[in-house]
Amino acid sequence: MGLRWLAAMVVSILMWGASGPISLAETYPSKPIHLVVGYAAGGSTDLVARLVGQQLSEALGQPVVIENRPGAGGSIASEQVVRSAPDGHTLFMSTIANTINTTLYPKLPFNFASDLAPISLIATVPNVLVVNPAVPATNLKEFIALAKSKPGQINFASSGAGSSVHLSGELFNLVAQVKLVHVPYKGSAPALVDLISGQVQSMFDNLSSSLPYIKSGKLRALAVTSAHRSAAAPDIPTMAEAGLPDCEVTSWFALVAPAKTPKEIVTRLNEEVRKILDRPAVKARLAELGADVAPSTPEALAALIASETEKWAGVIKASGASVE
């Protein structure tokens, strides 16, 4: 009897080991999912999160609750997710800002690259150099010439110190060898108000925020910062096309989870995200926001996070950019 009992236990353990991962994937999720966003409701990150969250809820059969935790360029929200249980029920809509923050906030109590598990890139969106129509420059070369003729006299607004909007301007200063003065705001909306009224002269804004004002003629677009022209604004040249290579910035949104989230759950979420981003209605909605769908493998997203962290560390150190 003892040998039979032992044999039965071994078989049981082997069967559990073989079926465990499958069972985990099949039973997930077992409760509502919280999708944390590091910015206020109504912004581009929030809009992307709500679009993806709604689709995930339908696919997974559980509510996806959007939780907005603005502050410190998304670092407050990402720390919350880092400290959450790695069971797939807390996710984070990360952005390019999180790779910038790694250098900009040297005392962060976590490591973005190692303490969060990549799931998939969601979408990319270029920044765009826009100026008030009163600025006497109709193209990028004229704007650079103007800036060189008036060092320290032309400013650029941003949605906040440390944002991709801010760092795009610092990169532009380095590559174009000009001295635009940074004027930080608490979000894109107030910055755009002052840009349109002429209180500030330029801005490297997310295309999704500026596009309505470009179309209405309230702002003049000089170039997008992406490697290729945006489908949402095909008439706007890239920085390289306009005569300034090596000034490429592509903002992005990506889904991540706490580190040690089971691989089976990460794989399941990646598969669902890929299906969601292949839907015409989702592609159309993201296009309205000036974004392009960009599904990826977890490994590709990890590589992007590593390369972006290295790139922005160099820009921050060279420019002396800070959150002070």
Image (cartoon, rainbow, N blue to C red):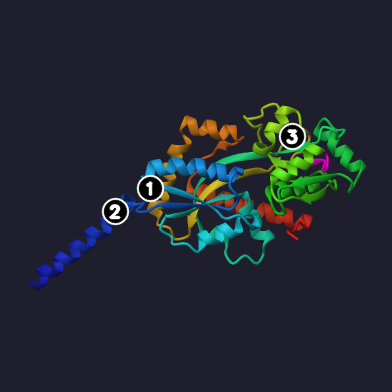
Task: Identify the image quadrant of the C terminus.
Answer: bottom right
Q: Circle 3 is placed at which residue position?
A: 223
Is residue 240 visible from the viewing direction of this image? no
Q: Is residue 277 magenta?
A: no
State left or right for residue 153 relative to residue 321.
Answer: right
Query: Which circle's residue, 2 or 3, is located before the other in the chain?
Result: 2
Which secondary structure is most common in the magenta stretch? loop
Check the image and report above or below for 169 versus 214. below
Q: How far, Cα to Cα, is label 2 from label 3?
A: 51 Å
The location of residue 301, given as percent across then percent down, is 53, 48
Segment tinted magenta in the rendering: 198-203
**Amino acid type, mark 1:** Gln
Instruction: Judge depth for marks 3 and 1 and give the one in front.
Output: 1
The part of the image, by quadrant, that contains residue 285 is top right
- Tell me which residue sits at (69%, 59%) in the image: 104
The location of residue 142, given as percent across then percent down, is 86, 34
Query: Which circle's residue, 3 or 1, is located before the other in the chain?
Result: 1
The part of the image, by quadrant, that contains residue 126 is top right
Which mark identifies residue 23?
2
State left or right for residue 203 relative to residue 83.
Answer: right
Task: Identify the image quadrant of the N terminus.
Answer: bottom left
Label 2 secondary element: helix
State left or right for residue 89 relative to residue 126.
Answer: left
Which mark identifies residue 62?
1
**Amino acid type, mark 3:** Ala
Residue at the extreme left of the image, as rendered: 1
